[in-house]
Image (cartoon, helix red, strand yellow):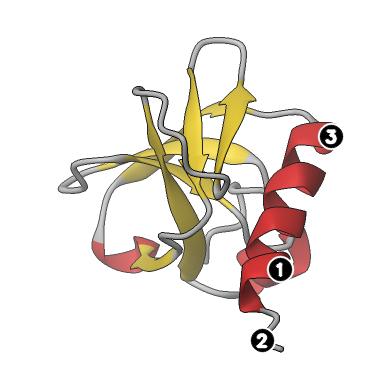
Amino acid sequence: MAANIKQGDIIEVAGIDFVPLVINNNERSMTDTKVMVCPIIQEETNNKKHIYVEGEHIKGYACCDQVRRINLLAKQYKAIDHISYEQIAEVSSTINSSMNFI
């Protein structure tokens, strides 16, 4: 279980070469060992799916077009930062809009 991981957490995961932002809702994060994340990159791009996020210690661009699922049971991990509710809402909205097909 990933009970100590919440939506909006920026986590550090052993063996992962990017900084993951947790996008699962909290209910799902508490009952599953697998969490949905999107990588945070440092360099700015002109991609509308890359949303600027800033925690207390970490800032960068959440790549909402690169959602991944990580099995935390198989890796060591810890929360290292957290983004605001407003930023979580913007990231979630961007991810949801890219899933809507016309």
Q: Secondary structure at mark 3?
A: helix
Using the image, determine if residue 70 lies above or below residue 39. Answer: below
Which of the two discs, 2 and 1, labels the residue nearer the N terminus?
Answer: 1
3D distance between C-alphas at marks 1 and 3:
15 Å
On the picture, is 29 further left or further right than 37?
right
Q: Amino acid at mark 1?
A: Asn
Considering every residue shown, the one lying at the far top of the view is 57
Front tag of 2 and 1 = 2
3D distance between C-alphas at marks 3 and 2:
25 Å
Which of the two discs, 1 and 3, labels the residue nearer the N terminus?
Answer: 3
Provide residue 49's location: percent of width, then percent of height: 55, 50
Question: Which residue is disc 2 drawn over?
Answer: 101
On the picture, is 57 further left or further right than 66?
right
3D distance between C-alphas at marks 2 and 1:
10 Å
Question: Which residue is disc 1 drawn over?
Answer: 96
**Along the viewing direction, whichever of 26 and 48 lies nearer the viewer:** 48
Question: Which residue is disc 3 drawn over?
Answer: 86
**Along the viewing direction, whichever of 50 and 82 lies nearer the viewer:** 50
At x 47%, y 60%, the residue is: 65
Provide residue 16's location: percent of width, then percent of height: 21, 47
Q: How many marks?
A: 3
Do tag 2 and tag 1 residues touch (Cβ < 8 Å)? no
